[in-house]
Image (tube, rainbow, N blue to C red):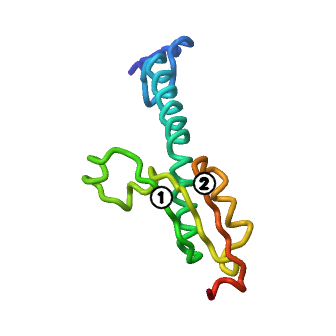
Amino acid sequence: MSLSTRSIPEPDPLEPVGRSCKLPRPLWLFLATLALVVVSLGLIFGWPMFRQRSAINAVENAGGVLETRRDGPEWLRGWIGNDPMRVFDEIRSVEVNGANYGDADLSWLRGQPRLVNLLTLPDSMSGL
């Protein structure tokens, strides 16, 4: 009885080993670039909307009054409603009570370029 010996082939050093996803390199570069562009556009358009919404919420939660000018397409406002479209409105005037609103809360209003009037009432005048 004779035992046969088999030789195990040597692996090719130029062949990649263990790759589970074999996308071509240009496709990976395209996907990375696309992800970077989407994140950048999200920050460019999303950050001002976030600041606008935060300013509106801060003033309303403190019992303040806002005067805004409607902005944005009317067809979109009719389609999704007024509340989601408030991020496009321009804040023109803000009136707040000094007892409920501090200097730290005014930081949200810093990024409002079209704010014309900011009225802060001191505690003694809030009951008038």
Give the residue pinned by disc 2.
Answer: 116
Let me know if residue 5 appears in the view: no
Q: Give the x, y percent position of residue 93.
A: 56, 61
Q: Give the x, y percent position of residue 87.
A: 46, 54
Q: Is residue 36 above or below residue 90?
A: above
Discs 1/2, front: 2
Relative horizontal placement of residue 62, taking residue 82 as reference (left or right): right
Relative horizontal placement of residue 114, taking residue 75 as reference (left or right): right
Give the residue pinned by disc 1.
Answer: 68
Q: What amino acid is labelled 2 in the image? A: Val
Q: Is residue 20 above or below residue 78?
A: above
Q: What amino acid is labelled 1 in the image? A: Thr
Q: Residue, x 38% and y 62% (percent of image)?
A: 83
Q: Residue, x 51% and y 25% (percent of image)?
A: 33
Q: Residue, x 52% and y 65% (percent of image)?
A: 66
Sequence-first disc among 1 and 2: 1
Q: For mark 2, does the 10 Å Cα neighbourhood hold few (<14), some (14 to 19), or many (20 or more) residues? A: few
In this view, the residue in front, 128 or 105, is 128
Q: Secondary structure at mark 2?
A: loop
Q: Give the x, y percent position of residue 126.
A: 64, 84
